[in-house]
Structure formats: C-alpha cells, structure tokens
Amino acid sequence: MVAINLLSVALATLAVAPRAFGSPLEPAVLEARGRTHNGKETTDRPVIFPYPLNTGKKFDETPKTTKTCFVDALGNGLDDGPNILEAAKKCNNGGKIALLDDLYTVRTPLDLKLNKVDIELQGTLKFVDDIQFWEKNSFKYEFQNSSSFMQIGGKDVNIYGGGTIDGNSQKWIDAHAVNSWVWRPILITFYNLDNAYISHINFRYSPNWYILVHTSKNMIFDNVSMAGGSSSANAPANTDGWDTYRSDNIVIQHSEIDNHDDCVSFKPNSTNILVQSLDCNGSHGISVGSLGQYPKYFDIVENIYIFNITMTNATSAGRIKVWSGEYAKPPSWVEGGGGGHGRVNNVTWDAIRLKNIDYAIEITQCYGQSNLTRCAEVPATLKISDVLFRGMYGTASKKYDPKVGSLVCGGVENCNNIYARDINILPPSAKSPVFACTNMNQALLDIPCV
Ligand SMILES: *[C@@H]1O[C@H](CO)[C@@H](O)[C@H](O)[C@H]1NC(C)=O
Ligand SMILES: *[C@@H]1O[C@H](CO)[C@@H](O)[C@H](O)[C@H]1NC(C)=O
Ligand SMILES: *[C@@H]1O[C@H](CO)[C@@H](O)[C@H](O)[C@H]1NC(C)=O
Ligand SMILES: *[C@@H]1O[C@H](CO)[C@@H](O)[C@H](O)[C@H]1NC(C)=O
Ligand SMILES: *[C@@H]1O[C@H](CO)[C@@H](O)[C@H](O)[C@H]1NC(C)=O
Ligand SMILES: *[C@@H]1O[C@H](CO)[C@@H](O)[C@H](O)[C@H]1NC(C)=O
Ligand SMILES: *[C@@H]1O[C@H](CO)[C@@H](O)[C@H](O)[C@H]1NC(C)=O
Ligand SMILES: *[C@@H]1O[C@H](CO)[C@@H](O)[C@H](O)[C@H]1NC(C)=O
C-alpha cells in the first residue's frame, strides 16, 4: 500500500515537472548539433547549379551550417509560426531550421531575414485560411496591390527537403468569385534576398501567385513542383508560377508547374533570367509583362533566355504583354493601367514543345484596353527589340484554328529585330496555320503572317 502511494506521488510530481526529458513539455524549438530528432533525420544540402545553360553570372557558394534548430509541430491546429520565428532567430547566422514533422500550421506572418541559413522542410507548412486575418497581417507590396503570407530576405539561404508549402486556397477562390477586391496572398515572396538556392520543394494551392521574386538577385530554383486547383465550380485565378520584379540573375529550372496563369512572368526590371527545362501545364505561357502599367516607372525586361520548355494546355507559349498608351480600366480588373514607358530587349524563347496551345506566340501592346480602335489612336510607346522565337514545335488548340499566333505591335517604331525561326505549329483542323502580324518587320518572321 505504502509503496503504491509513493509511486503515485512520484508520478504526479513527474507530470508537472517542467521540461522533463521526453515529456510533451520539452521546448518546441531545440537547438542541437546532431542530425536526428524524434527519430527523424536531416539530410545534406543538395548541390544546385544551373544546367545545361547558365546566365554567365556568378552564384556564390554558401557556407556549411554549424548547428540545427529542430521545430516540433504543436499539432491540433495550433499556430507553429512563433516557434518557426524563434528557430529563425536562434539559428540565424550559420544554422539550419529543421521542419521534420508532418504538418506545421501557420497563423503568423513569417518575416524571415536570414543570413547563412538552411531551411530543411520535410513535412507540410500550411497557412490557415482566415481571410480577414491575412487581409490585416499579410505583407503588402506596392506593385499590383500584392500581398504575401511569408517573406524571406537576407543572404546565403538554402531551402530544400522535399516538403510542401500549402496556401490552403479554396476559401479565397470562392471569395474572389464574389468580390474581386479581396486580398489574396502570394504563397511566398523572396524580398531583398541575395544568393539563394530553392530546390526540391512542392508549392500547393496558392490563393494568388505562387512565388514572387522581389528586389532579389542571384537565385536558383531547381526541381520544384507547383499545383493547385479548386473543389468548387469557381476556378483559381492569377496563380502565376514565378513573377520576377526588380530582380537580377535568377535561374528557374527542372520543375513542373500545373497552374492557371503565367507559368513564369517577367515583371518590370527583370534582368539576366534563365528559365530552362520546365514542364508547364494549364498556364498562360512564359510571359514578359505586363509592362507599362504605371507611368511613374520605366519598365525594363532584358537578357532573358527561355530554353527547353514543354508547354501543355496553355493560352500562349511565348507572350509579351504591354499596356496601351493611356490609362484604361478593364471591366473585370481591379486596378487598370497603361501609359507607362520602358523597354523589352534581348529575350529568346528557344526549343519549346507545344501541346494544345491557343497561340504559340502572342505579342500585344493593347493589354488591358478592350477598345482596339482607341488603342490604335493612343498606341503604347514601350519599345520591344531583339526578340527571338526559335524552335517551337507542336500542336495548337481549336480555339483560333487555323490562327496559331498573334504578333501585334502598337507602331512600327516600337518593335525592332523581332525574329521567328523554325516554327512548326499544327492546328487541329490540319489547315495551313497562320499568324496575325501587325506593325512587324515580316522579313524577319519565318512564319505565315496574314
Ligand atoms: C492598389 O494600388 C493602387 C496604386 O498603387 C492604389 O492607388 C490603390 O489604393 C490600391 N488598392 C488597394 C485596395 O489598396
Ligand atoms: C527532385 O524531386 C523529386 C520529386 O519530388 C524527388 O524524387 C527527387 O529526389 C528530387 N531530386 C533532387 C536531386 O532533389
Ligand atoms: C529538357 O527538359 C527535359 C525535362 O523537361 C529534360 O529531360 C531534358 O534533358 C532537357 N533537355 C536538355 C537538352 O536539357
Ligand atoms: C493539365 O491541365 C489540365 C487542364 O488544363 C488538367 O485537366 C490536367 O489534369 C493537367 N495535367 C497535369 C499532369 O497536371
Ligand atoms: C527600373 O530601373 C530603371 C533604371 O534603373 C529605373 O529608372 C526604374 O524606375 C525602374 N523601374 C521599376 C519598376 O522599378
Ligand atoms: C542577351 O542575353 C543573353 C542571356 O539571355 C546574354 O548571354 C547575352 O550576352 C545578351 N546579349 C547582349 C548583347 O547583351
Ligand atoms: C489537357 O487538358 C485536357 C482537359 O482540358 C486533359 O484532358 C488533358 O489530359 C490535358 N493534357 C495533358 C497533357 O495534361
Ligand atoms: C472606342 O474608341 C473609339 C475611338 O476613340 C470611340 O469612338 C468609341 O466610342 C469607343 N467605343 C467604346 C465602346 O467605348
């Protein structure tokens, strides 16, 4: 009897003892030197480099990490955000943040300013779908009224691990169908980041663009996967794969994208960008722009190479979209725009396989202006030069059959040295394909212009 009583007293004491070894009260963020935690093991950082092409610019090596911060998921829908932020603090300057559990729930805007940090994500990091919360707490950017769940900046960052970042988009998809003004967060924004490698991560169900690369440089994205969808009658909208803005020396390669807007989009001031070996399905193509939306800025997209892409079920394969020469507010778009200046220079689409594409090539300088008579009266001034479409093969959709492309420049002086070579696109009717060409130097276009 006495022995049993003593034992229960001992157990009761153990139960309230703080931070007893192996108890649930162990801290959720553990700083350690080893590789394993709770039976799960971290892996080595993968070696990432551009291939087969490169940008000709340098990517620096990032130093080895010297410690690890393991974050235990709290479970039960509790917010893991504060612990992730704590780990980012503890392991900043040379550590690894290890997210090895199956599910991390996040209801905290994650602002990670990292220096020499690896993030190994093996499980899923999922944002809660509280629209009002994120309206107030997401990161806001001036460009196109964009907002984001999380942002990562700093220097020398590696993110990998085979895990998933999930934007839990369904509520936003349905809210957007009712009110197009609703703030829909971008899944992840890289803001003010220099020298970073993002590889082997799945991006799922973004309410908006998947990835915004904003004011960043020297980044490689490799072997990532993107996909989403809707379980209601409302389709996802604006789910661009990557958007680059005010960024330089970026490589996007060896990845699969299944989305409903641009697969990759080069927004204002995107320079030295290489996109290679992607499999894009359901997109609006790989696009320059839109540009010229805001007259207060000069928009530059320069030195872009797009190579070895399989483009399936898309509205376009290669696209350049420029707003018209004056402000216009399209009926369904929140902001409108036009009248801006800038240049598109030295952009190549090379080796593109097409399956079921509305337009192989689409160039417009009347983006956002549905009144084409008006657009012709006030044409865009933004200049497009040294553009090459080379080696595009495959099938068009029946949408514009037998038209398989549209190259319409706002004025002959706006478009210089635009070439098309080795283009072979078959419309489903098997009629001879045609391209609509306006204000283009047709001597440089080896395509059947009408
Ligand atoms: C969107 O951005 C424009 C221009 O930057 C701004 O005037 C407008 O107020 C913004 N809209 C919202 C909903 O914040
Ligand atoms: C690339 O991603 C696939 C699918 O997620 C994975 O099986 C493979 O291990 C990854 N490769 C590398 C080198 O990370
Ligand atoms: C083109 O991309 C595919 C994957 O989409 C890859 O298997 C192939 O090796 C790439 N070809 C070249 C020449 O890089
Ligand atoms: C590609 O997109 C179509 C819709 O456009 C979809 O039905 C199909 O499942 C997608 N395929 C893949 C492999 O993602
Ligand atoms: C792009 O860069 C040019 C030249 O530095 C600058 O004048 C312009 O404001 C920039 N545009 C944007 C959108 O930042
Ligand atoms: C054009 O861009 C490519 C990269 O896409 C670059 O290698 C080349 O040097 C650029 N050409 C000029 C004239 O700057
Ligand atoms: C393209 O989309 C159609 C449905 O719209 C689908 O049946 C087909 O599988 C898609 N093609 C590919 C390669 O995914
Ligand atoms: C389109 O623009 C033309 C020329 O400015 C104008 O006469 C016409 O009324 C406009 N049409 C509509 C539907 O606004």
Image (cartoon, helix red, strand yellow):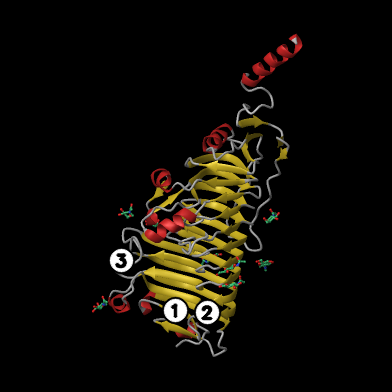
Disc ID at residue 407:
1
Among the 4 quarters of the image, the one containing residue 97: top right
- Quarter of the image with the N terminus is top right
Name the residue carrying label 2. 420
Question: Where residue 268 appears, x then y in whole percent?
Answer: 42, 60
Amino acid type of the residue tagged 3 in the rendering: Lys
Cα distance between the residues tagged 2 and 3? 32 Å
Secondary structure under badge 2?
A: strand
Instruction: Say whether residue 336 is left or right of residue 447.
Output: left
**Mark 1 / mark 3, whichever is N-terminal:** 3
Image height of 422 relative to 186, above or below: below
Type of amino acid under label 2: Ala
Residue occupying image coordinates x 41% and y 56%: 175
Q: Which residue is mark 3?
A: 329
Q: Nearer the viewer, mark 2 or mark 1?
A: 1
Helix, strand or loop at mark 1: strand
